[in-house]
Amino acid sequence: MEYVIGALLMLLFALIVFLAFGPFFTVQQQSAALVQRFGKFMRVASPGLNIKLPIIETVAGRINLRVQQLDVRVETKTEDNVFVLVVVSVQYAVLPDKVYDAFYKLADPHTQMSAFIFDVVRARVPRQKLDDVFEKKDEIADAVKNELSHVMYDFGYGIVKALVTDIEPDHKVKDAMNEINAAQRLRIAATEKGEADRILKVKAAEAEAQSKALQGKGIADQRRAIVEGLRESVDEFQKSVPGTSAQDVMNLVLMTQYFDTLKEIGATSRSNTILIPHTPGNMTELSNQMRDAMISADLVTHEARDRSHGAVASRRDGLDLNGGNG
């Protein structure tokens, strides 16, 4: 009886050991497990249900095969001595055929990749000015990817993408850059405003010049029409009223225009016209003065014409006498 109980206890203990260190284990999707036998690597277990020898074999570790991201903040300075903080994001993944290298060759992949990122960024940024760093950030990212891809491949890691996600200069430098940009934009705005004002003034001057030209042409046409109308009126008046002279007709026209002017001035309350005395006696005197002025002008014109004809006749006589003497 005691022998049977001891056997059952031994069987129960063996079952517990078997369950604790059983041959079955599972591996999750997009991951891999490394199996060792007495501390020596034996194989890589793929996702799903796997079998190992109890006690003899153990699962040394599991490794993630999905794409992961590492963000590294690198502080350095540019060629123009401006300190900047460059943030580099590296996306990487363990190569499925190099799980052994990724697990056994590299103890801390994040530290290793961060060191190479620091080296690349601090080798390139100090050779560029601050503006060039912003413009050529893709070149920095490509350099980081090429360097890491070459080095990390031997350790079982593949670099999917490297990105420069942020470039942050010192806040004083940033404020100065914003002020410079604002000043440039204000200068451009002032230049454009001045150009717009110049164009408006030029167009206004051109419009005024055209207006003056048209106004002058209109006045000239108006005076020409008035003269033509007066000529026709004088001719018609002389035909209708026999014995009247042109001077009588002009006096009548002047009188009519004078009263028309008085009518227009009286029609408005805002007038800056200076009126001469317009009593009947003064009207007669005004008419006489205008008539005398026209007569004097006509006499001067006739005298000048007579002197011109006399001078021509004297030269002709002189030429005849000289010809006769010859």
Image: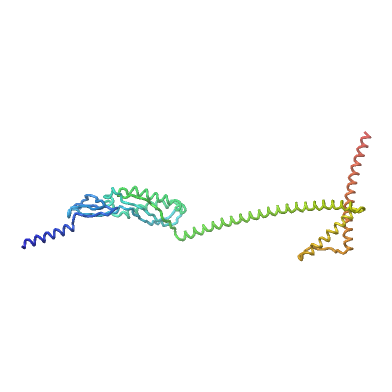
Q: Is residue 95 left or right of residue 39?
A: right
| Residue farthest to the top, as pictured | 326
Position of residue 71 measured from the top left corner of the image (x, y, whole percent): 37, 56
Between 42 and 245, the one nearer to me in the picture: 245
In the picture, measured across the screen, residue 235 lies left or right of residue 124, that is right
Question: On the rendered image, what quadrant is the C terminus found in?
Answer: top right
What percent of the width, then of the height, locates residue 98? 28, 48
* Vertical order, 309 against 113 (above or below): above
Q: Is residue 273 left or right of residue 246?
A: left
Q: Foreground: 22 or 156?
A: 22
Residue at x 62% of width, y 56% of height: 197
The chosen color scheme is rainbow
Which picture quadrant has residue 83? bottom left
Which quadrant of the figure contains the N terminus?
bottom left
In the image, farthest residue toward the bottom: 269
| Along the viewing direction, whichever of 233 and 207 lies nearer the viewer | 233
